[in-house]
Structures are given as C-alpha cells and as structure tokens.
Amino acid sequence: MKNTALNETHIALGAKMVPFAGYNMPVQYEGVNIEHQTVREAVGVFDVSHMGEFLIEGEYALDLIQKVSSNDASKLAIGKAQYSCLPNDDGGIVDDLIIYKIKEDTYLLVVNASNIEKDWNWIQSKNDVEATMRNLSEDYSLLAIQGPKAVEAMQSLSSHDLSAIKFYNFVVGDFAGIDHVIISATGYTGSGGFEIYCKNSEVKQIWDKILEAGTDFGIKPIGLAARDTLRLEMGYCLYGNDIDDTTSPIEAGLSWITKFTKNFTNSEALKAEKEHGAERKLVAFELDDRGIPRHGYDIVDGNGNKIGNVTSGTMSPSLGKGIGLGYVPTIFSQVGSKINIQVRKKAIPATVVKLPFYKV
C-alpha cells in the first residue's frame, strides 16, 4: 500500500484512513455531511495525490493524444484544459482524464489513480509516432481547494489574480511560496475552486499555508467520502462505477466530449452508435420515497422486471433525498420517466431527472 506525501499529516489531523486505488487515503475527518456542506458553503481542501500524471512531449505529442482521446485536443491553447476519455477497441472506455496544454508540443494528462498502469500501457501501445512519454505520477502531488470562498481565501498565496482564471483554464506560477506550480480552475465538486499540482517535496508547505490562509473562511480538510457525494450531486461520472471498459461514451452521456472531427480509437463504431442511438443510457434519478440507493442495486420496471442497475447512489446531503445514476434501456431514459430501485426487498419508486441534482 502506497502513501501520499501527506500521509502523516492526515493521521495527525485525525483522518480515518482507508485503502483506495493502492493508496492509504483519508476517507473522512469530522464526518461526511459536515465536510460536504463545508465545500458547498465555504471552502475545503482535499489531498488527491493518488491521481496519475503523464507528460507527453515532442513534435508528435498531439498526434498521439488525438489518436487515443475522444475529444479534440487540437482546440487546446496553452493554459487551457480539456475533459476527455480514452476509448478502447470494443466500444468501452479505458479511462476518463483531463488534458492540459502546458506549452507547444507539451501536454499533461491527469488520469485516475486505479488506472495509472493500465492507461500508461494503453497509450504506450498506441505510440507508433514515438512521442516522448514520462510518467510523473510518483513524483507529483495534487491538492483540490474547492468551494465558493476558494478564490477569496487563497488569493493571498499567489501573485496571480485567481479570479481571472476561468473554468478549465490554468496558470503555471507562484503559490504558497513555491514557484512553478500549476494552478488549475478545475475540480470534481461543482462548487468552484482550484487544483494545485506540485512536487511531493513541496506539498506539505503548500498544504499548511492553504489551511492557514483559509482559517478565517472556515476551511476544513475534506476526505474522499465527501468528494464522492459532491461529485454525485453534480452527476459527474466515476470510473469503475458509471463508466468502465464495457460502457461507451455515447450511452454514458459523454457525446459532448466525443468529437468526430478526427479519427481516434474505435471512432467509426462510436459514430455509428451515436447516429443510430444507444440501446441503453445512463440516467439520473431521485427516489420518490425514503431510502438510499447504492451501487449495484437493481433497477426494475413497474412489474418488477430488472431493467438495469444503480452505478452510483447516496443520500444527498444537500437535497436530503436519495439520488443516483444507473443504466436503463433508452425507452426509460426520458426525464420524468418512472422507474423503481430495489432496496433490499422493497421496490422504491423513482423519477428520472435532469442533471445536475444540485443547482447552485
């Protein structure tokens, strides 16, 4: 089991540590609901240093990225980031990721922790253009400062105007006394804020200064459990739950990051699927009665016939009701459609809704 550079810091803060994607990670500090509301109403900081970072460089870097990713990375300018996915050869998804254009012919790919080795091998297997690839995952840390007060709370730590960094844009500059860190206006919570990429040797200083600067703004350290409830309220997909090697980006509602302006892995089949319509779709639902949907629960029709399964589910801390995502036949996917979630021996009625669940 690996540790992030902040492992001892989390233990000292009283975090409950759990194994996650091969790392010891803080799942919670004070409690999921408290941490969740801190991010929705103020500002919180997450250690997500388990995520993977690949640097792809050279004259043919963009050619490789275009081949393996579904979105059109040629649209990226320096200082911009893009959400994308890595399609496999069979209609599914190897992983979802964020692509950063650092400078001309230099890109940073940020991938899910559980897929680092898998993604690296996959991209390398497609690298017939001999782009230079470097796996930086072991050397870099990632902190997410999230919440509506993030800009105000963190401005004292940088000479850059943080309010001027637009969503899915970034700067490379000074932060918390460290030069050359990536300050990215991205995140997985829907409440705004930043993600900070730095070297492992720098992260403790940055973490301490973040907590110090955020004191007057109610900052708290936040664990992975609240990260999951926050992302689910926004309807953001979690790899391994809502998307995986068997789910296509079309049926997962990711057509918006699947651009057929270029050829990429399995693009012809995905284009045909989009044109003809997917047989099933990932839908968002809210329970009409009390109950908590969980990953793996059956979705059934009015006659009790299984039509799908819940991929992600929870009791929404912001809404006070059971919410979830799951795949159902397309006929059940329209907003307002009625489905049922099998919670133990009871089929609880639910309604298909439009995302996000939580609206600012």
Image (spheres, helix red, strand yellow):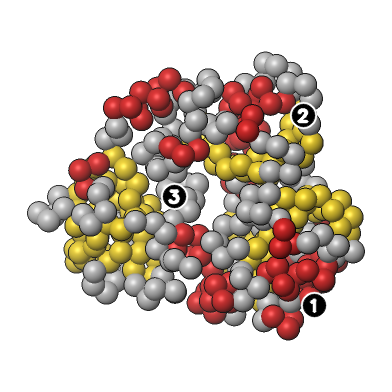
Does 57 appear above or below 96? above
Across and down, in percent, residue 100 comes to 69, 41
Identify the residue at image location x=72%, y=58%: 164
Under mark 1, the amino acid is: Glu
Under mark 2, the amino acid is: Asp
Across and down, in percent, residue 140 comes to 78, 50
Label 1 belongs to which residue?
A: 212
Left or right: residue 301 compared with residue 327: left
Under mark 3, the amino acid is: Asn
| Label whose residue precedes the other's in the sequence (3 or 2) | 2
| Label whose residue precedes the other's in the sequence (1 or 2) | 2
Left or right: residue 226 compared with residue 185: left
Left or right: residue 52 compared with residue 353: right
Check contact, mark 3 vs mark 2: CB within 8 A: no
Does 9 appear above or below 87? below
Across and down, in percent, residue 351 comes to 24, 60
Identify the residue at image location x=53%, y=76%: 37
In terms of secondary structure, where does tag 1 sit? helix
The disc placed on residue 166 is: none
Across and down, in percent, residue 166 comes to 66, 54
Residue 23 visible to the viewer: no
| Label whose residue precedes the other's in the sequence (3 or 1) | 1
Q: Residues within 10 Å of mark 2 (few under 14, many from 20)?
A: some
Does 110 appear above or below 357? above
Label 2 belongs to which residue?
A: 105
